[in-house]
Image (cartoon, rainbow, N blue to C red):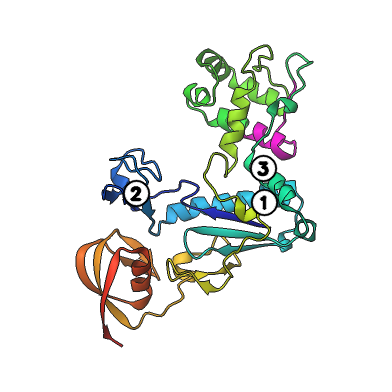
Amino acid sequence: MIFEFDADELGLFSPNDLWYCPNCGSRGVVGELRGFRAGVCPNCGGPAKVTMFPDPGREERLKEEVDTLVKDFLMGDFGISRTEISLNFSGNRGYHIHVRSPSLRELDKEARQEIVDYVTGRGIDVRYFFDVSRVPPRGPKPTDGGWKGRVARKLVEILSGAKDASELVRFGVSPALARRIMRERGHVVELIKKGVWPFIDTKADDAFASVSALVRSISPYMGKEIDTNTSVDIHRLIRVPDTIHGGTGLLAKRIRDLWSFDPYRDAVALPERPYLNLHVEYIPEFEFAGEVWGPLEDKNVELPLHVSVYLLSKGVASWRLTTQG
């Protein structure tokens, strides 16, 4: 079974990324737009395409998402051994997590969908987390397993780090209740650690709305336009490790150590020579193959083969001729 994490599907855009609208021809740099919405042209509202460039901060976020899936869900909740999990760089915008556990190999499409739904938090009815026959209601503790413990730990984290009541309001807590919780948050945190949730009004129609919002905030997949078919479709084709990705010229590479892996250093497949003469439309400053490139705009330049293929594949440069061997 395979899980796929792509930066664009998770909405991890960098200020240096470029956007282009094939509908109206508008283009620009993501960092110049406040609140850029992926896939939407800010001028005409049509479909926009984003060209991503290397960004260490984005890579760190992606790795955190991968680490959460592997340690918290696959190993923690499903009990899969780390030896049955392998990590691959996709060769472009993300990572593939391959699970080769015999317990998953024979699962059909419906069973795989159940696993995906669990990981994404889809269909979780948080009402079953609580015993409302007791006053105050009893609910999840941080030490609980699965989603119950995950929700309790997230709430303790939010309460411990919140600067003001507004950080609770964004989860659907009423302003008045949020202020009361903040005034007593030390006591509330201690109660939650014991599984007591004193602020759940079981008579209210939206009693568990804020808890559902916590679930949505926790899952790395929740609310994202991801391709879950990669995990569900048993006939899905997936890129073979150690082959070159046509959209970047990088290797779809097996990873031994996630945190030390740098895709723009360790997955560079092509040599430095020959150099190519390119016309570069625009590139931001970025690091590739151990060197810093850009920014460049409307320039004729001579660049090494590996970075030339990367830029040509992304459509931000055009090839003119080979000038030296």
Q: Is residue 258 above or below residue 221?
A: below
Answer with mark 1 or mark 2, whichever residue precedes in sequence: 2
Specify few, some or many for label 1: CA neighbours under 10 Å numbering under 14, 14-19, or 20 or more. Answer: some
Q: Secondary structure at mark 3?
A: helix
Which quarter of the picture shows residue 121?
Answer: top right
Answer with mark 3 or mark 1, whichever residue precedes in sequence: 1
What residue did someone put label 1 on?
Answer: 71
For the point 33% across and 43% down, the residue is 41
The residues tagged by marks 3 and 2 sit, at their Cα atoms, a distance apart of: 32 Å
Quadrant of the rendering where the N terminus is positioned: bottom right
For the point 40% across and 56% down, the residue is 55
| Tag in front: 3 or 1 | 3
Percent x, y of residue 17: 35, 53
Quadrant of the rendering where the C terminus is positioned: bottom left
Residue sitting nearer the eye, 114 or 286: 114
Q: Secondary structure at mark 2?
A: loop
For badge 1, the amino acid type reads: Lys
Answer with mark 3 or mark 2, whichever residue precedes in sequence: 2
Q: Extreme bottom residue here?
A: 325
Task: Report the side of 258 relative to 275 (left or right).
Answer: right
Q: Is residue 238 above or below residue 213?
A: below
Q: Is residue 166 above or below residue 263?
A: above
For badge 2, the amino acid type reads: Pro
Residue sitting nearer the eye, 178 or 31: 31
| Tag in front: 1 or 2 | 2
What residue did someone put label 3 on?
Answer: 117
What residue did someone put label 2 on?
Answer: 15
Residue sitting nearer the eye, 152 or 272: 272
Residue contact between numbered discs 3 and 1, judged by CB atoms under 8 Å: no
